[in-house]
Amino acid sequence: MLKNCFNPNVLTMLVSLATVLVGNAQKSPTKDTRPNIIFIMSDDHAYQAIGSYDTTLLRTPHIDRIAKEGMIFTNASVTNSICAPSRAVILTGKHSHINGKIDNRTPFDTTQTTFPQLFKKAGYQTALFGKLHFGNSPKGIDEFMILPGQGYYLNPDFITKKGDTVQVKGYATDIITDMTLNWLENDRQRDKPFMLMYLHKAPHRPWWPRADKFKEFYNKKFPLPETLFDAYENRGSAAKTAEMNILYHMLYGHDSKVKPETWDVMKAIEPKVQERRDRFYDDYDRMDNEQKIAYDAVLNRINEDFRRNWPNMTQRQKMEWKYQRYMQDYLGSVSSVDDNVGRVLTYLDDSGIAENTIVVYTSDQGFYLGEHGWFDKRFVYEESFKTPLLIRWPNVIGPGTTEDEMVQNLDFAQTFLAAAGIGAPADMQGENLMPLLEGEKENWTREAVYYHYYEYPSVHMVKRHYAIVTKKYKLIHFYYDVDEWELYDRINDPKELKNRYDDPDYAEVIAQLKEELLALRVQYGDSEELDQKYIEAYTLDR
């Protein structure tokens, strides 16, 4: 009976269908399922100005979302707290003394291999939008729009892939995000994974918020840091001679937005701060008339307040006035970064690619927001040494995870490469963070990190120093024109108010840390000979 039911035409049809399906399968390439990576980095964004770390000054709901849905690092740091060197470390996975970019002046060694090159070679589509700070044609990047040097907040210029420079009307933070979203929507190849670097200028000095944020934040008052009036007792000479005090070194025009015309109608302004009259106009003169009207509404209030009240203020009141002006503009700039990060996260959700996209948020270093009376960075002291680091990777990192291991920007390149399944060059010096990201902390072995700052004598006059930092202690050696050591107990003295180097109770700790510091210098290829080499090169360059 079954034999009589057999239809040879059906068999022929099935064979033909199978042949077509196999042929189509052979013609259709297998989709590359390696994770996408979006590396978001702002410039000088202090961890104190991110809600996930501290809500005293500001809430950042969109950046905080990365932490809530992923991992926040509480002991992330940099190897050299200054813009271009930090970026060179990130790109190469090597310390400054190895990649050669020790300060903002020294040229970057373009023969160095950077991690974007390795991503491109491995089949990733790559793009970069925003502030690179050095180099006009980054290797390994398929598409880019780069701010020349520091760039401008208002109507900024961008260097294009063609090598020309174009001006784009608007506010830099918004524009960089527009470019990023445009690339994701229109230029991204759907069949390839991507590595996208989304790099903000904000909140770098001179802190021009967008006009609406300028107005909003001028009406806010912020709590004073406990150490705003620090007298640097129990510290060495480095803290006492640095030139980054808000009252005595922050510029009236460039920073506090006091117009030179206001100076002209006042008698000598005290304390006197050396600055060029044209610094205020660097950004202001880039505005069109409509933009100037929007900003002048607040600028006029600032200048009238300064003209009327400054001469009668005490030194303490002047410090507080400049601090509030600093925070209003700095935090207003950060607020726009947060809004725009939210735009990108929303796009990832709406486009359906969030689940297979690693999102990293960090800064090129930390920053002082009035702690110890300072602005800027450079020191290995906590506020500039520590940097925000938040990573979201769905189905790999558990939501709401906090990690306190000692990690650095030195580790980014190797971690990104490992996440993508790309081999890292043997000469990279970082540690792959994958054991921490995947919850395998028992495979993490680092207990201390190494720091080295070189740009002295120069702006802000922060002395050369190198250091070893563990979860418990920080041992620092200041050198060149001094030979001073400092030890801070990070657990019992988190604000770093007392140098314990001469405290006999810490003698054993110091001896052990000196051995470990020497071992780290050997491990990373640093030495007294290199210290001297870079001193001589820096002196000759000047």
Image (cartoon, grey):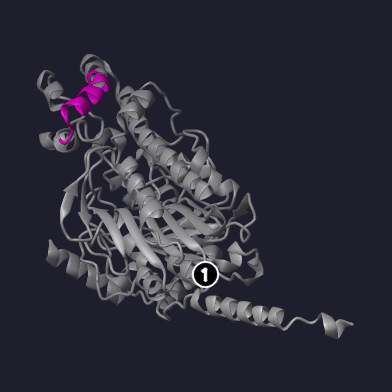
Residue occupied by mark 1: 31
Where residue 442 appears, as percent x and y from the top left, is: 66, 69
**In the image: residue 204, left or right of residue 105:** right
Where residue 343 appears, as percent x and y from the top left, is: 44, 42
Q: Secondary structure at mark 1?
A: loop
Where residue 412 appears, as percent x and y from the top left, is: 45, 64
Q: Is residue 537 above or below residue 302?
A: below
Q: Which quadrant would residue 277 be assigned to in this image?
A: top left
Crowding at mark 1 (Cα within 10 Å: few <14, some 14-19, many 20+): few
Quadrant (top left/top right/bottom left/bottom right) for the C terminus: bottom left
Q: Is residue 195 above or below residue 520?
A: above
Between 140 and 192, the one nearer to me in the picture: 192
The magenta span reads 286-300
Where residue 98 appears, as percent x and y from the top left, is: 32, 73
Q: Is residue 422 above or below residue 200?
A: below
Between 537 and 33, the one nearer to me in the picture: 33
Which residue occupies 52% across, 73% down? 30
In reply to whether residue 297 is colored magenta, the answer given is yes
Which residue occupies 53% across, 43% down? 64
